[in-house]
Structure formats: C-alpha cells, structure tokens
Amino acid sequence: MMEWYEKSGFGENPFSTDPRKNHDKLVGMEHAVEEIFYRIDSGSMLAVEGADGNGKTTLLMIAAKKFGGMRNVVYLDCRTLDRKLNITTVLQERNGLFGKLFNKKPRNMIVLMDNVQQLSEKNTERLKYYFDQNYIKSIIFTTVSYKRAKFSDSLRDRIGKRVISLPVLTEEDAVDIARSRIGDSKLFNDALLKKIFKLSDNSIKKFLHNCEHVASSASRKRRSMAQAVDLRVLKDVV
C-alpha cells in the first residue's frame, strides 16, 4: 500500500522530524549555525537555548556532520542518561574515544551535549575539567533554558557571554519551512499552513507532525489538497 506522501508525489515523508535529515530546510537558524561552527573552530564553549521542538538537536546534527569526518565528535542526549551516571564513564563507552583519556590526550575532541538541563551540576563540572585540561577542544550545550541549567558558577564563567537564544518562529517562518519541504505543491495553501501552526504551540516539530497528520487525512479521503475540515484530525493527536 502506498504511503500518503507517495500518493502526493514525494519519494519520502517531507515532514519528517528526524534531526539527521533536512539540514538544508532550516529557516531562521543561519546565525545559530554560523556561531556553532565558529565556536567549534575556535575551541570554545557555547550554550544554545530554545524551546523543545524548535531545532536544537538538528543544529547539533549539522555540527556533527560537518566536523565528524575529520575530528572525534561525541553526541550525547542527556535525556537518555541515568542521572546517577558519571559522565566520564559514558564518554569512555562512546566508541572508545575517551579510552585513552588518562594515557594520551585525544586531539580535536568535540562534545555535543543535547538537553543539558537534565545533567547534574557535578557532571557539568567534570566536563569543564576535561575542557580545561585540553582533553576536549569544544563543547556545545543545548538546553530549554540556560538560566535553569544545572551549571556550576565556574562553568558559567567559562561560557561567559557565549549564549545564543533561538528565535521564536512566526507563522510566516512556518510557511517557509513547509514550502522548503514541499515546494509549490498544492497539497497545502499558505492560509491552512498558518492555521496548523496556530494549533502547534509554537513548536516547529509539532507543526511538522501536524502537517503530516492533516496531509494523511486528505489522502485517506482521496483528495490531493488538504482542507480546513482535515484539521479535525488534530483533535485526536496528543
């Protein structure tokens, strides 16, 4: 059975929220990408704050893709870690990159810490230690709120003013994001896309999921264009 997106002429789901895909479809994130690249190249720390679902993980995946080919890159989602774990153990287990930590310093180590608000203050201080000892060249943190992250005072001093806040996207941005994925397809008109965004709690991730649900609804009704009536399906989406 054909998927809804195949019936609409797409080879894959254009509304995928897989952070490893659609790197070229980001809207309004150019400054954040440039800043991340600059801080990695210059060997410093950076904190990126923004609401859930607004592209923080995708930004880290872009950095991993750019720097992973020539340098050692470790990506960690702190939401998946046991809060009682020692971050040193976790790093040692990731591809053996820190296996030689106490024998030979790794070169050009880059650590990408996603959702760092879930990491304990003690573990963030351990990361600072490895950075100060030149075991780590650069650390990029993402968090929903820099102020609420469990950073020690000394780590905040080390980060300094290198904190960027992702922009709050507008309805027009949401339309641009959708258009970057579906082009001039008649599947959605701009007015309907704006209505979907209003039902998405200002979250681009939720917006994309909702677009997928609405498009699938139209496909099930054998329509090539989504209509306002298809928004009813979102009432059943948690």
Image: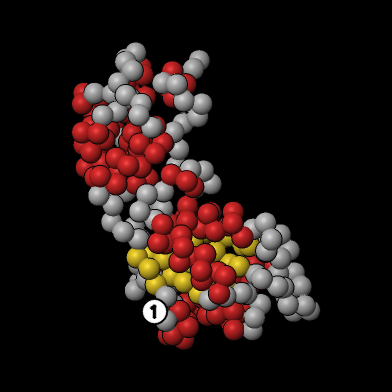
Is 176 displayed left or right of 82 in the figure?
A: left
From where the camera sits, is residue 189 visible? yes
Q: Is residue 67 left or right of residue 207?
A: right
Residue ID at (34%, 65%)? 165
Viewed as shown, does residue 213 lie left or right of 122?
Answer: left
Q: Position of residue 180 (x, y in %)?
A: 39, 39
Q: Is residue 149 above or below residue 236?
A: below
Residue situated furthest right in the rendering: 103
| Residue 232: percent from left, percent from top | 23, 28
The quadrant of the picture occupied by the C terminus is: top left
How packed mark 1 is, by other alpha carbons closer than 10 Å (few <14, some 14-19, many 20 or more), is few
Say whether residue 54 is left or right of residue 73: left
The residue located at (51%, 26%) in the rendering is: 11
**Residue denoted by label 1:** 161
Going by the numbered disc 1, the residue's amino acid type is Lys
Of residues 31 and 217, the one nearer the viewer is 31
Q: Residue at x 35, y 29 (%)?
A: 184
Q: Residue furthest top?
A: 222
Percent position of residue 231, x then y? 24, 29
Q: Residue at x 47, y 46 (%)?
A: 24
